[in-house]
Amino acid sequence: MSQGQRMSQYEDRMTIETPEGLVVTLPLAGVGSRFVSAAIDFTIQILLTAAAFTVFVGFGVGGGVGPGLFAISVFAVFFVYDVSFEVLAGGRTPGKRWTGLRVVRSGGQPVGFVASAIRNLLRLVDFLPSMYLVGITSILVTQRNQRLGDLAGDTVVARASRKPVRVVGAVPTAPLAGALAAWDVSGITAEELATVRTFLERRDSLEWGARTALARTLAERLRPRVGGVSTQDPAGDAANDEVFLERLARVKAARM
């Protein structure tokens, strides 16, 4: 299994095995949702370009400086726009957020500046010869629904889960500090804390089945190594795996 990854039997899903041996399934975006997302972002970019043009005309910027400044503005709108949102907003431009999509690395990690810059620089190639023909063809024929920019940047576009978060049991807030103070988390490593944090940050993008399975795997592995968890504490119940992971992350971070 190359780079810890394997494809599921469904062409619109990608199964990733992390270095910790955890398995996460990412639902991949298809042509339709990506087209709608791109159309929304393109509309916003056109409006921003028109606004920039209006500003330049209104202020009478001309001569040799005007065209250059306008060209920089257009570059910012059509390149910096995508890269900024993808890097700083969890892989989501406004169009992707509206359609429930996000850009991630092919290993499931958050997209970084270099990967985002590569995938967006190659957008011009994907657009050729017109109407994203190259990009659409690439999405249809590649196993992970990737356009050329995704292949070069080692990224995929995944569908975020829209399912509501299940809350199991009420967790009283008043005695929370006292209960957590008794926890002994000395057996939890910094690497394991990072794994828990990664899950908590990305859980809303996982399908419900994958989310609960991953929370269960993490909790079953870590719960026996945490001391001082009261039998009355909901976090000690196997039905509250996410509650346990949330509290574990808080306690461990506070004591590092």
Image (spheres, rainbow, N blue to C red):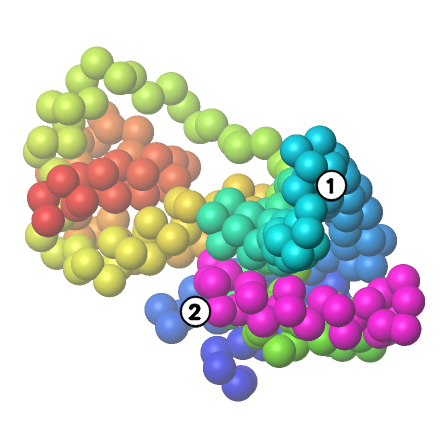
x then y, percent, for residue 32: 84, 53
Q: Which one is in front in this view, the residue at disc 2 or the one at disc 1? A: 1
In this rendering, the answer to whether 255 lies above or below 168 is: below
Residue drawn at (10%, 49%) of the image: 256
Name the residue tied to disc 1: 53
In this rendering, the answer to whether 119 lies above or below 249 is: below
x then y, percent, for residue 185: 13, 48
* Mark seen at residue 18: 2
In this rendering, the answer to whether 153 lies above or below 1 is: above
Magenta residues?
Answer: 109-134
Label 1 Cα neighbours within 10 Å, binned few <14 / some 14-19 / many ≥20: some
Residue 70 in sight in this render: no
Tag 1: residue type?
Answer: Phe
Q: Earlier in the sequence, mark 2 or mark 1?
A: 2
Q: Magenta stretch mostly in which secondary structure? A: helix
Seen as rendered, the residue at the extreme top is 174
x then y, percent, for residue 171: 33, 21
x then y, percent, for residue 7: 64, 74
